[in-house]
Amino acid sequence: MKNSKSATCETKWLSHWFDWLRSERGYGINTLAAYERDLDIFCHFLEREQVSASALTRQDFRAFLAGEQAKGLARTTMARRVSSIRSFYRFCDRRGYFSLADLSWMKAPKTPRALPKSVSTTDMEMVLKAVKPDRQPSWQQQRDYALLMLLYGCGLRISEALSLRANRLPLTDWLQVTGKGGKMRDIPILEVVREAIQEAADSCPFQPHGDDAFFRSARNAPLNARAVQRLVERLRLELGLPSHTTPHALRHAFATHLLAGGGDLRAIQQLLGHASLSTTQRYTDVDEKRLIDLHKEIHPRSGINR
């Protein structure tokens, strides 16, 4: 942890909490960085308002939330920020650093739940065809096609797809993935996905081996997330697709298309690696919206005024 924290949040408390998140909870580096930013912002608020962490009141906390909302933060960011702070306070209570009698009011403000933005099956076909032309593609095109197939065909996060190691090839019917919080899950691999990965492996001039990252850049370095984002952004602009067409939207498309095809919600939860079923249930809202739009579009009486 940084050593410039406010005296209102003692550095040793923060340091011990951060170590606990890493060692005991097994949080990944991205989650740890986000939690650290959250507490950094919160502690600077306490310092500015001259409030001790151990003497925080409901009014102080509401003032903090109001200031954060004024920044136009996303609902998910606000929810994570509150979760970070609650985690810190509970940790301090268990360790005996200080205790607040009641934390029930430490909640994120309720806002309308945003639906996951997916990619239609038609748009998804356009993306896959655009990255792999009819003629024999170069190894980079084979790599990009295989990567997009892995994201869409398995519903992986970017970090999960890029964590594929050379020694996992050739792929079998199942792939073990380590997701958020170090949680492992097994994902079934479609034959078309396995074939795409194998073609990419055969065409790669660098031939990574052992524990090397499978997806390589033109300089034979492990491919990074920004490169994947730029790839999808380029395809989105070339094809004129909606602005929400991102690598993560391919994961949403995986879940939405499975659900639309009759997939079981619990099974989809397992495939996505969601800790809570309520997170996966957002996709039922997406599917219901599609059905409502379809009903309005094709029903014979949809345009008749009553």
Image (spheres, helix red, strand yellow):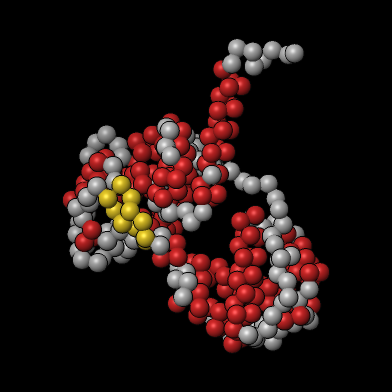
Image point (72%, 77%), residue name: 100
Q: Is residue 102 visible?
A: yes
Is 200 displayed left or right of 147 in the figure?
A: left
Vertical arrangement, residue 239 with respect to residue 144, above or below: above
Is 100 displayed left or right of 96 in the figure?
A: right
Image location (x, y in percent) of residue 75: 65, 54
Image location (x, y in percent) of residue 124: 41, 37
Vertical arrangement, residue 170 with respect to residue 28, above or below: above
Is 13 displayed left or right of 175 in the figure?
A: right
Q: Picture quarter containing residue 137?
A: top left
Is 44 displayed left or right of 126 in the figure?
A: right
Question: Looking at the figure, which quarter contains the C terminus?
Answer: top right
Pick the front one: 111 or 151? 111
Pick the front one: 153 or 218? 153
Image point (21%, 61%), residue name: 167
Vertical arrangement, residue 305 with respect to residue 121, above or below: above
Image location (x, y in percent) of residue 286: 55, 37
Q: Is residue 200 visible?
A: no
Image point (24%, 67%), residue name: 211
